[in-house]
């Protein structure tokens, strides 16, 4: 037993002969906030895909709540994944055929059954991101900023233990990026989720308790950690 919700041990990832991750070990604890920076192509998305076992490592082990998940069956894995992780992507990846509320409840459907309190919670989250009354809107009628706030709500619907945000503000203007980032941080605090933020934005990276940089296939603590704040 240790304090990690999710732990990666000695992860290596190769695509054909290209080494993207070399012996990376990492863990994230309850309510921790962590940022990972790194150049485009450094392997950040690959790293979080492996963490959520959306992609397999070439070598190494992955533990979710102390269980070695490499050996779990697929059905159990997807239910566990939906309970542990909430995902926010650069492009919001909403399902165009579904309304706002149907998109938000989608991860709930994977984790368990939808009940009346879930719908109420979805509406409460929408209120918290200033989208009250948007529940029946078609998602293709939303602005980029509104779509991303719906994606933030969707990531929170299962009250995940960890929110993984992969450049969540990368396609937004500065003002909208700041508003969205503040919403992500405050919702994670309120609902007790840890936050793993992948970002090119140094200001947002510095807001996290711990910062790492992915470079030359290695994950290292970043220089500008707390002391330079
Ligand atoms: N399925 C795949 N097959 C082959 N190569 C891949 C595959 N997925 C990723 N790569 C390669 O692995 C490297 C890391 O990609 P990744 O998407 O993880 O980078 P990233 O750090 O997230 O970049 P960005 O900041 O642009 O999103 C890249 O060179 C990419 O081309
Ligand atoms: Mg990426």
Image (cartoon, grey):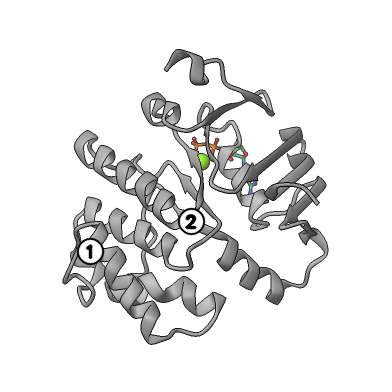
Residue 163: assigned label:
none
| Residue 10 coordinates in the image, percent (x, y) | 81, 38
* Residue that mark 1 sits on: 127
Q: Earlier in the sequence, mark 1 or mark 2?
A: 2
| Residue 201 coordinates in the image, percent (x, y) | 39, 29
Q: Say left or right for 96 vs 135.
A: right
Q: Say left or right for 123 vs 203.
A: left
Which residue occupies 79% across, 68% down?
72
Which of these two is toward me, 124 or 134? 124
Which of these two is toward me, 196 or 42? 196
| Residue 83 coordinates in the image, percent (x, y) | 57, 67
Q: Say left or right for 227 vs 215.
A: left
Quarter holding residue 59: top right
Residue 20 seen: yes
Which residue occupies 33% across, 71% down?
122
Q: Say left or right for 197 vs 62.
A: left
* Residue that mark 2 sits on: 87
| Residue 147 coordinates in the image, percent (x, y) | 27, 58
Viewer-side label of 1, 2: 1
Q: Vertical placement of 57 versus 140: above or below?
A: above
Element under disc 2: strand
For mark 2, does the 10 Å Cα neighbourhood hold few (<14), some (14 to 19), or many (20 or more) residues? many
Quarter holding residue 176: top left
């Amino acid at each position: 037993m240790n304090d990690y919700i999710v732990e990666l041990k000695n992860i290596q990832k190769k695509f054909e002969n290209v080494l993207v991750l070399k012996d990376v070990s990492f863990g994230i604890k309850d309510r921790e906030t962590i940022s990972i920076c790194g150049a485009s192509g450094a392997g950040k998305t690959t790293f979080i895909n492996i963490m959520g076992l959306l992609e397999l490592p070439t070598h190494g082990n992955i533990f979710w709540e102390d269980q070695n998940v490499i050996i779990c069956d697929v059905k159990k894995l997807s239910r566990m994944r939906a309970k542990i992780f909430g995902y926010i992507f650069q492009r919001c990846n909403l399902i165009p055929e579904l309304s706002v509320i149907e998109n938000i409840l989608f991860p709930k459907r994977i984790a368990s059954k939808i009940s009346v309190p879930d719908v109420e919670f979805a509406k409460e989250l929408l209120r918290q991101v200033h989208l009250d009354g948007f529940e029946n809107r078609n998602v293709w009628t939303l602005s980029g900023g509104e779509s991303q706030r719906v994606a933030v709500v969707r990531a929170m619907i299962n009250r995940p233990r960890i929110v993984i945000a992969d450049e969540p503000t990368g396609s937004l203007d500065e003002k909208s990026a700041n508003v969205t980032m503040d919403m992500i941080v405050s919702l994670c605090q309120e609902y007790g989720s840890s936050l793993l933020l992948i970002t090119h934005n140094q200001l947002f990276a510095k807001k996290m308790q711990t910062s790492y940089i992915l470079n030359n296939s290695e994950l290292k603590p970043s220089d500008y950690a707390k002391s330079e704040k």
